[in-house]
Image: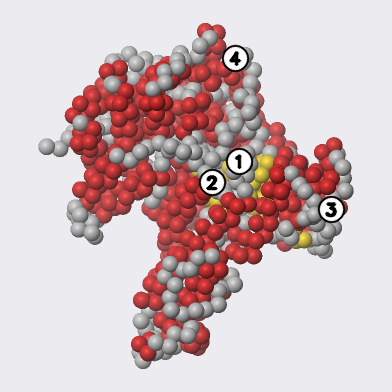
Amino acid sequence: MATPPLALPPVANNADVRFLGTLLGDVIRAYGGERLFEATEAIRKASVERHRDGGGDGGGHGAGDDAGTVDLGLDRLRLDETLDFVRGFMLFSMLANLAEDRQGVAVEEGADLASALATLERQGVGRDAVLHLLDHALIAPVLTAHPTEVRRKSMIDHRNRIAQLLAIKDTGATTTPDGDTVDEAILRQIALLWQTRVLRRERLYVTDEVETALSYLRDVFLPALPALYQRWDRVLGARVPSFLRPGSWIGGDRDGNPYVTADSLKVALAKASEAVLGHYLDQVHALGAELSISAEHASVDDAVATLAEASGDSAASRSDEPYRRALSGIYARLAATHLTLTGKPAPRPGALSGEPYGDPKSFRRDLVAVAHALEIGGNGPLAGSGALGRLIRSVETFGFHLATLDLRQNSAVHERVVAELLAVAGVEADYAALDEDARVVLLRRELANARPLASRFNTYSEETASELAIVQAAADAHAAYGPQAIVNYIVSMGKSVSDLLEIHLLLKEAGLYRPGDPATCAIMAVPLFETIEDLEAGPAIMAAYFALPEIAAITKARGHQEVMIGYSDSNKDGGYLTSTWSLSKASTAFKPVFAAAGTAMQLFHGRGGAVGRGGGSAFPAIRAQPAGTVQGRIRITEQGEVIAGKYGTRESAIANLEAMTSATLLATLEPERLSPAETIRFSAAMDEISGTAFKAYRDLVYGTEGFRTFFRQMTPIAEIAGLNIGSRPASRTKSDRIEDLRAIPWVFSWAQARVMLPGWYGVGHALQAFEDHGLLREMSIGWPLFAATLANMEMVLAKSDMGIAARYAALVEDDAVRGIFTTIREGWHRTHDTLLAATGQSRLLERHPALDASIRLRLPYIEPLNLLQIELMKRHRAGEGDPRIGEGILLSINAIATALRNSG
């Protein structure tokens, strides 16, 4: 008899959830034993009943001030059973996430390209305007290694295999291509999940992060993007340019990560090239098998005949098959390219030899020659679409590099390195002592001089030698893989023009910046403005930068300039609302600066997974950007659990990439939705609201005595360090100040404790103090920015729970310090009530039933995990040495993060 499904509150009507929950229950009973199953089921039922009977704010989630009044039976679990129980609830959350992703819960209605085109056409924007925009557009999801993905890759792989099996089941098939029954194959994968170790035993290295990102790029992006372009070609009735291209920071992001070096950069580039070339070799080989066209039955274009003759393929069996012979030659050249770029022979070397391709364009040229010959030879269906068409699209999109790799380093590092280079070269003894004007004069003088500063006869510090090695590795990458391999060099904590010129000076050492009239630069220096103060100063910095003649010439030749705006640190600095508004105002203020410089603006949005780090749905977030700031060009960071959620399968990747594209088209081409008068009124109101929210947030986080101790004792920030989820240290320095803590562990810790403070604190104070409540209501309806801001905050409030949070607050040792929680709880209720008033709702997520059901489904599973985590933290902090306690804490962190989905 089948086990009753684990984890089914009444709101769950997703058939996949019921099916997978039943199988998970069977696995727990079979592998964990009857006692574990019965205990798990009893806790589940008790928790479900508690939430069904009104636990929370009356809507089933949120305040939850009565947490723990129902006996869930957690104290009756033995320690080993506790670990198994946590694993079971974590696996349910993982499977529930999969079920939701398959049914499109995470993708907004109307976020596909066809719907976006229909919207634009209703507003008088035709398809010609869309195609014209796409000619110079760039949309780039950029994968980063920021440590918010708690699951091991092995767990994600099993999850993806289940997704593939469910897709087979959707077709009505009952067996897999291998002959297994589909249901048994799914059960087997869940059993493997149950028996797979959840936690990483060793810390992650950069090479591990490279491999993880590569699995998404190779297994998902490579097949998904050409298929997506094919769909768009049909929708638009024309072949669209290859404007959507992936990027990566992994292996090039050195900011605060001493383990990213020139060697790791080379590894990341080589592995990516090996993956994409291997894919091309497989595709060319398959085409050779497919294109069996005989010269006896079809005319042969001169270009293909030339390729066939040059191939060296003299096999008698193919003497009348020019396409196969041509593809044999292409394959031989591609195999030689593989050997040249990777140092390894092709996986399937082939019998012929050939000269390696000098660049991806040469490879594409041969493929296009084949496609053109098929078209003029009456084989049109074989030319522009199908496998050959997708391969041509792949080469345009991925080149020989797969994903464009960014370089990133902190401005303070550049300052030290440049100071050392100038001092050792005898140019300037104390660069750090110069003011900004003097620095700019000196740097410009050096940039005009072709003489390098570094010399092999001098000795440099380890830091300077490392940075010089990085720019040289970048130059080598351009020579090997092409200029698209590395396009951007981001300077974190960008605060001045000299911060950007220092990058150019380092690039000059490797020949990537060349003086002249005009000067040229092969890699773009990109400032990252992160704090509230930096965002306010950004437009003036860029105006001064563009005013430099050599920079103006470089920017004009490139046609655009990128600016990166940071959501994470601006939020930690000034709170959610002020961060959101400061980012919007900065984007607007950049627009006239770029217009005056005569160059297109490209904004790079440094968003995280959690709302407290700029997370939330990309579709409304892009559409809510200020008018005229998107301009068809946008890059967005994707990291951690967001990568797995958005790009874990080909289907979810296609849906999310299409949503990003549709939103970019709408944000660029839609008429302004606010009148000038509304813009002035709404902006003035937001200035006032933001100011109040900023003061409330700063008073709590940076102005409350004992807050630092409160945060570190209430949340599992110390325990999170043991998760081994990233190669980068949690803090920029050894200080325990909030200012020095990275934004990721800051947000992650508050999420674990169910406070979610970075995603809402201060907003309630601001909305309550604002007198014109009617204007707030008007803004929530008519202003996309304000609507998206409140919607993201509403999701955060729904996932938070002040009752659970109070249990965490009890971990704080000092009574007076513990009292800080009263302020936080009052702030939560104030934010909750004013949000409902501003949006005209009676409960949270009243207008978002799918998201409401998704969160309700999880709450009965998260609460027991929180309660167990608290008890384990108590025992751990009391000095109990049983290693299972530490393991249990880490498992609970993993499980809670999985259930919350976007927690970092």
Identify residue type, mark 2.
Val
Q: Determine which residue is flagged by label 2.
A: 206
Q: Determine which residue is flagged by label 1.
A: 257
Identify residue type, mark 1.
Asn
Disc 4 is placed on an element classified as loop
Disc 3 is placed on an element classified as helix
Which label sits on residue 706?
Answer: 4
Disc 1 is placed on an element classified as loop
Q: Earlier in the sequence, mark 4 or mark 1?
A: 1
Identify residue type, mark 3.
Glu
Q: Are marks 2 and 1 in contact (CB under 8 Å)?
A: yes
Q: Earlier in the sequence, mark 4 or mark 3?
A: 3
Instruction: Write the residue at 58% across / 70% down.
Output: 359
Q: Is residue 369 above or below residue 705?
A: below
Q: Earlier in the sequence, mark 2 or mark 3?
A: 2
x, y (%) of residue 165?
A: 27, 51
**Local crowd size for mark 2, using a 10 Å CA cut-off: few (<14), some (14–19), many (≥20):** many
Q: On the picture, is 68 further left or further right than 461?
A: left
Is any atom of residue 61 visible in this view?
A: no
Furthest residue toward bottom? 296
Is any atom of residue 343 visible in this view?
A: yes
